Image (tube, rainbow, N blue to C red):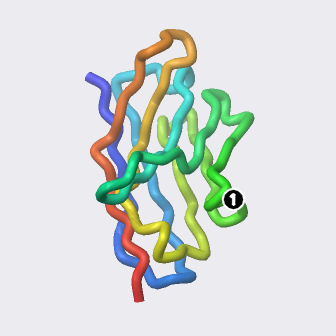
Amino acid sequence: QVQLVESGGGLVQPGGSLRLSCAASGLSFRRFTMTWYRQTPGKERELVAQITNTGGSTNYADSVKGRFTMSRDNVQNTVYLQMTNLKPDDTAVYYCNAASVTNRGENYWGQGTQVTVSS
């Protein structure tokens, strides 16, 4: 079955950095657009960063542009989110999503990883 497993979350001070990973299995990874979302209690899940199935294009929320970088390794079936200059407002549960480019409506979610930015 399809699994998306996020890792790399934790507690970091403002201005610090973290790198999140999302390892995918059970799917044809190269056929999926990958997206990082985040969610805080009482708020809707918001898109943070997205990368096309080939890795040729990325898209970022305005709030993270210039601070976050998303990448993918289509050999290791893994996507990454490098987060720098973290702010308290970045505190959230971060989720990985895989959406098929060939089968509309087919998408999968990871279980999420907590990121807390606090002094």
Q: Residue at x 53, y 25 (%)?
A: 32
Q: Is residue 85 above or below residue 71?
A: below
Q: Considering depth in this image, is 26 or 101 the residue closer to the camera?
A: 101
Q: Position of residue 117 (x, y in %)?
A: 42, 76
Q: Quadrant of the N terminus?
A: top left
In the image, farthest residue toward the front: 42
From the viewer's perspective, is 111 left or right of 77? Answer: left
Query: Residue beneath label 1, please?
Result: 65
Give the quadrant of residue 86. bottom right
Name which residue lies at 50% across and 62% down. Answer: 19
Residue 100's x, y, as percent? 50, 19
Residue 63 drawn above or below residue 13: above
Question: At 56% across and 17% down in the image, what residue appears?
Answer: 101
Tell which of 77 and 104 is nearer to you. 104
Task: List the single residue furthest toward the top.
Answer: 103
The crowd level at tag 1 (other Cα within 10 Å; few <14, some 14-19, many 20+) is few
**Residue for point 53% across, 51% down:** 80
In the displayed structure image, the side of residue 54 where residue 31 appears, left or right: left
Q: Amino acid at mark 1?
A: Lys
Residue 109 drawn above or below residue 40: above
Q: Position of residue 102 (x, y in %)?
A: 55, 11
- Seen as rendered, the residue at the extreme bottom is 119
Instruction: Identify the secondary structure beneath mark 1.
Output: loop
Residue 41 position within the rendered picture, expressed as x and y whole percent measured from the top left:
30, 58
